[in-house]
Image: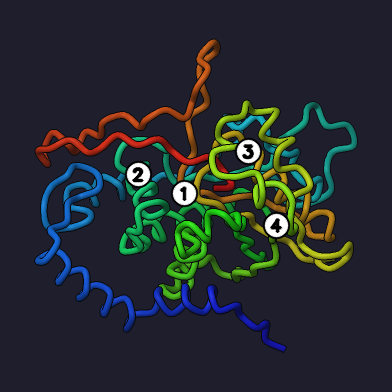
Amino acid sequence: MARRRTPQQALEGWLAAPGPAALLAACRELRSVLLPAECVVCGAPDESLCTGCALAVRHATLRPFDASSGAAMLPPADPRSGTGKAFGPPAEEPAETVPLPVIASGRYAGGLARVLLACKNHGHTDLAGILAEAMARALHEAVRASGHPGPLAVIPVPGSFHSRTRRGYDPLQLILAKVGLRGLLPAGTGIRRVLKYRTGTGLVTRGRGAQKSLGAGARRRNVHGTMTAGPPGTLQGISVLLADDVLTTGATLAEAARALRAAGAHVAAGAVIAAVRAPAPGVGNSTGSPPRPACEITCGSTAHEQRPRSEGE
């Protein structure tokens, strides 16, 4: 029996459909006349993302890579995962703990960082399309890296209640809806929304900014136990790919993997649009403002500097 969608999921699916998307595009054209728009990356007039910056963002996401080594809080890979090798039982005496493979389409920097921020925090849902392309690349590479031979369910990390209320939509759900409607999902995969935050715990009640102000270990403690994917055994026999927008420390993906494994799922790998570069030894903050993108040289003006949101926001 088909799963019933929530009103919010139905709205996000509707917004991603070709007809409503064309209507929204027309509305944006009208808005650009009445309220002139500017490129979220370089500030060029008339559109949310100019042609030059769009090309730069696509170029920055053409070569997905394994970002797991830069996220210290990621959980160990599932023993059943291939982690790039032939799928099968793990070695009897593994030499070292291998983190869950998480594939990123690009680095959280420059134009890609600004496009993500604009889509997440400034109402630029029109940028979901270019981010969907990047997410699709990460998903395809994650399937390959997982080494899993069978079908995989793509499980998005849920947004917190506070962030959904503040924005009025869930950016990750909107982006994944675009991936599905454009036929960009890897063969043998489908999107399932089974993760949610427990009522009255964790990020649901700890307020905006609490997570991003914490160190790596405190972040993991802050989110631990806040998610659920259902009672034990609910997902027995199901293999999944975790999906999120940005990988920072890996604390949020670790909690999502814990909840899925508690419900019986096999977590094969993860996929994100962008990964924050791990700080160099002795550098305290890896989440500062993204550097000025090279495309500003050709587009003419400087974008506003903005700080990235933490995972889970």
Residue position for label 4? 197
Q: Earlier in the sequence, mark 2 or mark 4?
A: 2
User: What x and y, as percent, mark residue 66?
Assistant: 55, 39
Q: Earlier in the sequence, mark 1 or mark 3?
A: 3
State the CA–CA distance, disc 2 to disc 4.
Answer: 28 Å
Please, what is the three-letter code of the amino acid marked with disc 4? Tyr
Residue position for label 2? 112
Residue position for label 1? 273
Q: Quadrant of residue 215?
A: top right
User: What x and y, as percent, mark residue 275?
Assistant: 49, 39
The residue mark sitting in front, 4 or 1, is 4
What secondary structure is marked by label 2? helix
* Cβ atoms under marks 2 and 1 closer than 8 Å: yes
Residue position for label 3? 250
User: What x and y, as percent, mark residue 219?
Assistant: 66, 34
The residue mark sitting in front, 2 or 4, is 4
Residue occupying image coordinates x 80% and y 66%: 235
Q: Is residue 74 above or below residue 269?
A: above
State the CA–CA distance, disc 4 to disc 1.
Answer: 22 Å
10 Å neighbourhood of mark 3: few (<14), some, or many (≥20)? Answer: many
State the CA–CA distance, disc 3 to disc 2.
Answer: 19 Å
Q: Earlier in the sequence, mark 3 or mark 2?
A: 2
